Image: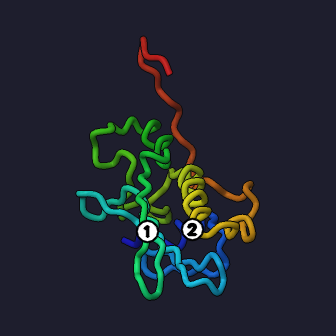
Amino acid sequence: MSLQAPEFYADLCLPFHNSTVVGNTYYATPVPGAPLTLRIGFTGTIHADTYGGLRLAVIHPDRGEIDAVALTFVDHGTFHRRDEARNTSPNSKQYGTFDTYHRAGRPPWEGAVTTGLRDAIEQYAAVWFPGAWASSAPSRAAGHHAHMSPAPPATHSAGRTR
């Protein structure tokens, strides 16, 4: 099934006007006319068709990749609510990940909260493309949540506190 990458990147509300998605990869030129390009792609896991985060890279047309960083979904709380609501064990392949299999009409990353990822991308962009985020940023009130479905009520075990 389709990864629906253009929709995922749109849900991140990245502010760069000079951008496109090719396959599952997002490309942007945050500073128009500058030689550097920002590339964002999904990082795989040891499980087939399962993704555990994003990889950001700065690309120079002559020197190629000059810097890169991996952002895991676990470290940025992307699926924390979903996994907690489903009682997903941290030792399972579903914890903090998504795969290409999903319910019809729903994205594979259903339940993602992208605020932490978006903030990390903003911080990374500020290093390599100073001022570019602020000059083209949409309102921070814009959707930071990607396709949230109502979470089932949390269940509490006796003697367990949160």
- Across and down, in percent, residue 32 comes to 66, 83
- Mark 2–mark 1 CB contact (< 8 Å): yes
At 48% across and 73% down in the image, what residue appears?
A: 58
In the image, 9 versus 29, the foreground residue is: 29
Q: What element carries label 2?
A: helix
In the image, 38 versus 78, the foreground residue is: 38
Instruction: Please rate how many residues cluster around mark 2, counting C-alpha atoms within 10 Å: few if below 14, some from 14 to 19, many from 20.
Output: some
Instruction: Please rate how many residues cluster around mark 1, counting C-alpha atoms within 10 Å: few if below 14, some from 14 to 19, many from 20.
Output: few
Q: Is residue 112 visible?
A: yes
The relative height of residue 77 versus residue 37 in the rendered view (above or below) is: above
At 43% across and 41% down in the image, what residue appears?
A: 83
- Across and down, in percent, residue 103 comes to 42, 60
At 57% across and 51% down in the image, what residue appears?
A: 148
In the image, 147 versus 47, the foreground residue is: 47
Residue type at mark 2: give it: Trp
Task: State how many labels appear.
Answer: 2
Residue type at mark 1: give it: Asp
Hey, which residue is sitting farthest top in the picture?
159
- Across and down, in percent, residue 33 comes to 64, 87
> Which label belongs to residue 88?
none
Q: Is residue 9 left or right of residue 22?
A: right
Q: Is mark 1 on a helix, strand or loop?
A: strand
- Picture quarter containing residue 138? bottom right
At 57% across and 68% down in the image, what residue appears?
A: 128
> Which label belongs to residue 128?
2
> Which label belongs to residue 67?
1
Q: Quarter of the image for the N terminus: give it.
A: bottom left
